[in-house]
Image: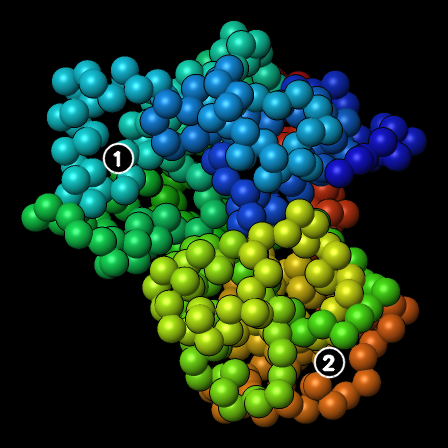
């Protein structure tokens, strides 16, 4: 993600010129959070800041310097090669302390997803050059990395926390499919830990309107801002014959793809869909019969998802579960492709998003199949039409890097000035 052209911007458009920003994020890839992080990095660089992206693993043993153990993540995130990479993770020996066994591992065996993530972050070792560095701003993604944010802020730099939805709700959903010791960790207990960690931030950023409303009620004493994420745009052409469904391997996506294969695909005979992303592993595990029936449709993870959008004629969003803003929906809008989407896929956006020409909203499998059959018979859009489409214009005005950069610059500059007394 080169932003070299930003060097030509007037200083007025680069309010963070010379500022040092620590950007902490989970060591995840092929998911919505990763796309958000890429947008953050690009925006800060365009604003003139020097950015230090720090990938933190919640798995034991992922300490900095072990290149072999980080190899898979590094290869899956080539976009981060435009600059120095920094890492963090807890060593194995940290898992053996009596305090960890009592306060972290034991609650985790009861399903406490919050305590184990916080516990691993508290014990993480960071890449040399980061631990003792000073920063003007710390931007943290997800509450469970706040122990690292506070460590790097040193009580001096302000902290902005991107909440990425209400995580306790996600943890409760994860726990529904797992076996834990009794009594199980409750949603309320995990939420309490989430909120307590969030209170260490100076400003809470929220990715969608519903999330902002929820957290304003839960943590009314903190400052909040609604800031739609900067999702990198997908190509708008040249176009091609493919009908695509892009999804990563998380619970909501797996459920949605299985629903599509089981309920929609049989009602649209003759249609072939390319299912892109590592969701194939989840479908194969949870519904082997559906995977076997449509094995040829799965492409798995691809190096450049942009190529998939570039050569497509139609994008499908058969989302039946999930919370927060759907990043893959934003990516699909940016491509300018015609879309068939469930109401759930459009969550977190305003009403206008569901009324865009070229975006067909459906609420049942039969409606989805009927819309798919009609779309296959229609004339594909060329690159010019895709770039001028209402979906693309909606993305540019609300969800593009330019829109995000403008808002982030104002918020970050104000926070730094308030802390430094400038």
Q: Residue at x 75, y 57 (%)?
A: 307
Question: Could you say where residue 50 lies in the image, as x and y percent from the top left?
Answer: 70, 22
Proximity of marks 2 and 1: CB atoms separated by less than 8 Å: no
Q: 75 or 292: nearer the eye? A: 292
Question: Could you say where residue 75 lies in the image, as x and y percent from the top left?
Answer: 61, 35
Question: Could you say where residue 408 lies in the image, as x and y percent from the top left?
Answer: 66, 40
Q: Is residue 270 left or right of residue 279?
A: right
Residue 357 circle label: 2
278 to 60, vertically: above or below? below
Q: 167 or 228: nearer the eye? A: 167
294 to 204, vertically: above or below? below
Question: Could you say where residue 161 lies in the image, as x and y percent from the top left?
Answer: 49, 36
Q: Image quarter for residue 37?
A: top right
Disc 2: CA contacts within 10 A as few (<14), some (14-19) or many (>=20)? few
Q: Secondary structure at mark 1?
A: helix
Q: Is residue 178 left or right of residue 290?
A: left
Q: Secondary structure at mark 2?
A: loop
Q: Residue furthest left?
A: 182
Q: Residue at x 67, y 74 (%)?
A: 243
Residue 286 can be seen, yes or no: yes
Instruction: Name the residue beneath numbered marker 1.
Output: 115
Q: Is residue 189 left or right of residue 354?
A: left
Q: Residue at x 86, y 65 (%)?
A: 238
90 to 343, vertically: above or below? above
210 to 292, vertically: above or below? above
Q: 321 or 16: nearer the eye? A: 321
Task: Report, in whole angstroms, how far the alpha carbon at label 2 lies from the one at label 1.
Answer: 45 Å
Q: Image quarter for residue 146?
A: top left
């Amino acid at each position: 993600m080169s932003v070299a052209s930003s060097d030509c911007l007037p200083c007025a458009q680069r309010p963070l010129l010379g500022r040092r920003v620590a950007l902490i994020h989970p060591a995840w890839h092929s998911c919505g959070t990763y796309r958000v992080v890429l947008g953050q990095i690009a925006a800060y660089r365009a604003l003139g800041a020097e950015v230090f992206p720090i990938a933190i693993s919640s798995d034991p043993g992922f300490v900095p310097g072990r290149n072999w153990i980080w190899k898979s993540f590094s290869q899956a995130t080539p976009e981060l090669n435009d600059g120095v990479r920094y890492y963090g993770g807890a060593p194995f020996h940290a898992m053996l302390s009596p305090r960890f066994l009592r306060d972290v591992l034991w609650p985790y065996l009861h399903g406490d997803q919050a305590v184990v993530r916080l516990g691993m972050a508290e014990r993480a070792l960071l890449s040399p050059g980061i631990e003792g560095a000073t920063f003007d701003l710390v931007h943290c993604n997800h509450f469970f990395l706040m122990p690292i944010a506070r460590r790097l802020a040193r009580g001096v730099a302000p902290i902005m926390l991107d909440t990425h939805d209400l995580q306790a709700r996600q943890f409760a959903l994860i726990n529904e499919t797992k076996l834990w010791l009794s009594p199980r960790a409750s949603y309320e207990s995990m939420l309490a830990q989430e909120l307590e960690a969030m209170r260490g931030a100076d400003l809470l950023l929220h990715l969608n309107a519903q999330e902002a409303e929820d957290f304003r009620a839960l943590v009314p004493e903190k400052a909040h801002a609604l800031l739609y994420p900067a999702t990198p745009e997908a190509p708008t052409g040249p176009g091609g014959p493919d009908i695509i469904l892009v999804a990563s391997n998380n619970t909501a996506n797996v459920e949605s793809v299985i629903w599509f294969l089981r309920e929609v695909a049989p009602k649209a005979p003759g249609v072939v869909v390319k299912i892109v992303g590592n969701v194939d592993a989840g479908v194969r595990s949870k519904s082997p019969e559906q995977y076997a029936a449509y094995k040829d449709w799965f492409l798995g993870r691809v190096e450049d998802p942009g190529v998939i959008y570039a050569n497509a004629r139609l994008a499908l969003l058969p989302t039946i579960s999930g919370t927060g803003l759907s990043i893959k929906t934003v990516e699909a809008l940016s491509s300018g492709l015609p879309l068939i989407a469930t109401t759930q896929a459009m969550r977190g956006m305003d009403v206008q998003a569901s009324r865009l020409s070229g975006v067909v909203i459906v609420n049942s499998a039969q409606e989805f199949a009927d819309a798919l059959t009609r779309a296959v018979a229609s004339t594909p859009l060329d690159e010019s039409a895709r770039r001028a489409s209402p979906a693309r214009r909606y993305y540019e005005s609300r969800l593009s890097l330019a829109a995000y950069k403008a808002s982030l610059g104002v918020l970050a500059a104000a926070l730094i000035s308030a802390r430094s007394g400038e």
